Image: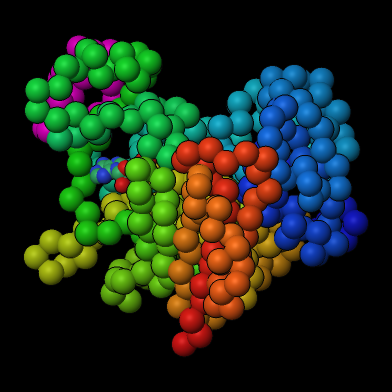
Amino acid sequence: MLEPGATIGILGGGQLGRMLALAAARLGLKCHIYAPAGDNPAFDVAARHTVGAYDDEAALAAFAREVEVVTYEFENVPARAAAVLGSLRPVYPDARALETTQDRLVEKDFVRALGIETAPYVAVDDAGSLARAVAALGRPSILKTRRFGYDGKGQATIRGGADLGGVFRALGSQPCILEGLVPFRREVSVVAARGADGAFAAWDVCENEHEQHILARTVAPARLSEATAAAAIEIAHRLADALAYVGVIAVEMFLVEERGAERLVVNELAPRVHNSGHWTMDGAATSQFEQHIRAVAGWPLGSTRRIGRCEMTNLIGEQAAQWREIAADPGARLHLYGKAEIRAGRKMGHVNRVELE
Ligand code: AMP
C-alpha cells in the first residue's frame, strides 16, 4: 500500500492523465507523467514530468526508477514499453490486460471464451478474406483495424456496392476484423474497478450517445431493467476477474431489445479510466479517477454510490468556447482540460449536471 507522499508514474499526458494526477494529489500522492513531446495538459498538474518517446527504453527505465508503481491513461502503450517498465516496477493494469485489449480480435476471442456475447466477427487479413467475411456476415457490416482504433478511427462501414479492395486499402491494408452490425437500442457502459485483493466495485450502468463516432453525452443511470443492469455489472466483474485486473476498467456494451427482452452484447473494453465515467467526478461518492489511483496504490476501493441523476456532456472542438455561459450556470460543473489549441473533434472539456433524487 503506497503511503501519502509516494509517486505514481503515469504514461500519457492527456486529459485522463491530468484528471488522474488531480485525484492523486487530493490523496497526498504525487504523479510523474511520461509522455512524448506535444500538448500534454497533464504536465500542468503533476509534480513531475518526463518528455520521452514510448520506444526510448533508457528514458522509460529512468522514469520507472523514480516512481513506485506505473499506470497509463491509454491502451496503445507499446508492448515493449510495458515490458521494460514491468521489469522494474509493478504496472497496473498489467501486460496481459494491455495485450488483450490492444487487439480487437484477441479481445473478442477473450470475451467469447467466457461465454459473453459479442457482435459476430471474422478476422480479415487481406482483400480476399474480406470478400469471404462479407459473404458470411452480410451488409452492412463494419470493418475495423485490429489495433490503434479509437473514436471511430480505423473503421469503415461496408454497404452494398462497396469496393472491398478499396475499403481494405483505405484502412491501411493491415490486419482487421469484420463485425456484423448489431441492431442496438442504446449503447451503455459499465465503469468498474478491481483491486489487487480481488475487491470489485462498479458504478451504475450509464448510457452513451455518440456523434460522429465521438462520445457526446453520458447519462447515469441508463434506461434498462434492474435485471439487465445487474447482468451488465456481472459481465464487467467476470471480465475483470478473468484478467486479474487492477485499476478502473470500462466495458462498452450494446443493449439489444428483441421481442420485449433485453440482451447485452459487449463491444469493447478499455483498460483505463473512460470518458463515459466522467460523470462520477460530480455524481458519485468516489470518482473513477480517485478509484483508479486507490486501486493502483493498493488502497481500499471507495464507495461507488451515485448521488443523483447525472448527465455528462463533452465539450468537443469549438463547443469549449461556451465556457463562459457554462461557468455562469449554477447547475453545471465545468471541467476544462487546459489544451493549448481548439481543434475539430478534440475533447476540450466536459460539463457534469447532477439532479439530486
Ligand atoms: P468502437 O470504436 O468499436 O467503439 O465503435 C464506435 C461506434 O461505432 C460504437 O460506439 C457504435 O456506435 C458503432 N459500432 C461499432 N461496432 C458496431 C457493431 N458491430 N454494430 C453496430 N454499431 C457498431
Q: What percent of the width, then of the height, locates residue 19?
A: 68, 54
What's the residue at 47%, 40% (across, down)?
A: 345
Q: Is residue 188 shown above or below 58?
A: below
Q: What percent of the width, then of the height, locates residue 92?
A: 66, 45
Q: Quadrant of ligand 1?
A: top left
Q: Is residue 106 visible?
A: no
Is 132 contained in the magenta span? yes
Figure quadrant of residue 113: top left
Q: Is residue 298 shown above or below 91?
A: below
Instruction: Please tell me whether the stretch drawn in magenta is mainly helix, strand or loop.
Output: helix
Q: Is residue 183 shown above or below 346?
A: below
What's the residue at 60%, 26% (across, down)?
A: 79
In the visual, does 329 lie left or right of 254? right
In the visual, does 230 lie left or right of 8? left
Along the viewing direction, whichever of 54 and 2 lies nearer the viewer: 54
Q: Quadrant of the N terminus?
A: bottom right
Q: What percent of the width, then of the height, locates residue 291?
A: 65, 62
Which residue of the protein is positioned furthest toward the bottom in this rendering? 357
Q: Is residue 315 shown above or below 284?
A: above
Figure quadrant of residue 175: top left
Report the magenta residues as a range: 122-139
What's the residue at 16%, 17% (across, down)?
A: 163
Along the viewing direction, whichever of 107 and 353 lies nearer the viewer: 353
